Amino acid sequence: MKNSENDKPFVVIRNEMKWSEKSKLFFLRFFLRQNDKIQCFRNSGSLILIFLSLNLILFLNSCGIRKSIKHIPDIKQYSLEIPKVTKINDSTFSFNQNYLTKNKQQIWELYIQGNPLQLGYNNGALTQNLMQKQEEIFFSKIEGFVPSKFKQNLLRGFLKWYNRKMYLNVREDFQAEIYGMSQYSSDQYNFIAPKFLRSMYLHGAHDIGHAMQDLMMVGCTSLAVWNENTEDGDLLIGRNFDFYVGDDFAKNKIIEFVQPEDGIPYLSVTWAGMIGVVSGMNKEGITVTINAGKSKIPLTAKTPISLVTREILQYARTIDEAIAIAKKRKVFVSESILVGSANDKNAVIIEVSPDNFGVYEVKNTSRVFCTNHFQSEAYKNDKRNLEHIAESHSEYRYEKLQEFLEENKKLNPEKMAAILRDKSGLKGEKIGYGNEKAINQLLAHHAVIFSPQKKLVWVSANPYQLGEFVCYDLNEIFSDKRLKSSGFAKSELNIPKDPFIDSQEFKNYEECKKLSSQIEYSTDDKEKVLSEEFINHYQSLNPDFWLVYFQAGKYYFNKKEYAKAKTEFEKALTKEITTVPDRKNVEKYLRKTVKKLK
């Protein structure tokens, strides 16, 4: 079949254009400078769409793509029993000594054991329905961002180019595990990539997501306290994982208990289809949590950060061993890894990026705070990090943690949960629900509390970190006691749900989230008109949040009702605006509005 006339220019570009890595980097940096000027691209999906589309030329000429597409890990070295899953009831499934069950707090609990390939197969067989549902949620969201079939083709090509080196930077045993799990992925998305490659790509989604939101889709907060800062002197760690892909994505979170054939058993708070770790603790009392740092847009995927932390959990017993593991891996985004250790009775932050490495250790104190900026000497003069401290919400949350510790001298798990659930600003100021300056931004996938020396873990039930914190004892779970008990949780140590769940304010916030999309849609659609009553009602649902006034201002501006727009922008500026760029954007709109009124 001959190419059409419209195809010929494309063929010429494909055959003749040669781009060096330096040229690609210049191209991407130029594009991102333009993005900085376009605030409507705050939506991470839009950013990803534009970024992917403009990489058309880049991926077509990469010689490494063919090798990566054909790559299959060596699985012959592992014995394998194909799982035959027994359905005990609608929410409990088993295969040999592997289990999947849903607890009364509606959290899935998964226990798997075996060699790397067997772990993958057991995971995939037990969570198949959940995994396929997560894939559907994730890829349908991408389809929503990229409705054009042409652009979807660009996306597929880009993924092949972007991830061409990932397999060279992922351990063979982890690849075997991903391969086993991927056999239970949906056939529906094979047009994007074969199952194994697709599963590999998804393990880099967190890294790509936060780089594109550097733009940040993640604004996590974590802290570790010990000695004089806790009631019993033991190490205590808390974290919010603010990775938001939508409410549906967080509904089926999984508490995963893994007993690997080689290495240390561990717990991970995760989702179906994921073998990496974003929050977890092993039986030796090593904990890991990850917080995104300020990243440049990476040119190629290397080791996903969640697989670095997985390796730490599976093989480290001390902080020094964790540092050694992190040091030898090549990452492609900037990340803070808060590592706690029962054996060291200490916590440090390992700060990694593609071009730098640092470790932040506190001196003469027994507490460590981690938000989204680096603190080690290695990044002391890093311009990107300094700019992030000055302009983002990271430093504000850091100061909020300091404020908490001044008010709460001796923490316990209940007090830690209260900190993770706090929605106020500095000095208790009302800054609006959902404000990223709050510790609790009301979008967390989960919150978790670790007591490493006692080997206890508390994980929040939905919604966000507001539900009951369910307690797990790793000493019991990874022992014969688990087989004799009727469940995984140590329910008598659970922390009750936040009363805020039952409040009218929470109901208002949830309604406000839904109405927000209507405001956005009507702002872009010239024909769509909203009543003043609708906008007033929308703002009354979350009256302390700057964004509800800014959105109303943009709506009126686009409808050429400049007097009303001016009033709304002025209201927004009286509130606690999330970042310096956000404030500048409101001020820019106000200046434009004033000019229109002259």
Image (cartoon, helix red, strand yellow):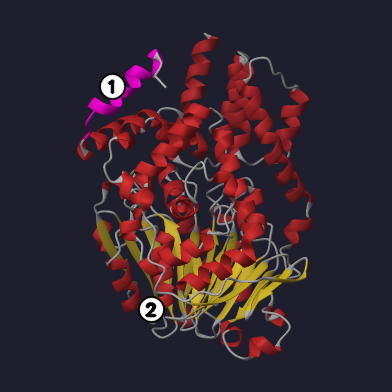
Instruction: Name the amino acid type tagged 1.
Output: Val
Instruction: Return the residue nearer the eye: 390 or 450.
Output: 450
Circle 2 residue: 316
- Residue at the (78%, 54%) spot, across then down: 503
Query: In the rendered structure, does residue 18 fall within the stretch colored magenta?
Result: yes
- Residue at the (68%, 30%) spot, across then down: 518
Instruction: Return the residue nearer the eye: 38 or 65.
Output: 65
Q: Position of residue 524 (x, y in %)?
A: 60, 22
Q: CA distance from mark 1 to mark 2?
A: 52 Å
Instruction: Name the amino acid type tagged 2.
Output: Ala
Residue 130 drawn above or below residue 40: below
Q: Secondary structure at mark 1?
A: helix
Q: Is residue 567 visible?
A: no
Residue 511 drawn above or below residue 559: below
Q: Is residue 95 left or right of residue 200?
A: right
The rendered magenta stretch, by its main secondary structure, is classed as helix
- Residue at the (38%, 76%) spot, across then down: 365
Q: Position of residue 507 (x, y in %)?
A: 76, 48
Q: Is residue 26 left or right of residue 301?
A: left
Instruction: Return the residue nearer the eye: 204 or 518.
Output: 204
Instruction: Return the residue nearer the eye: 242 or 123.
Output: 123
User: What segment is highlighted magenta in the picture?
Assistant: 5-19
Circle 1 residue: 12
Query: In the rendered structure, does residue 563 fall within the stretch colored magenta?
Result: no
The disc label shown at residue 140, or none: none
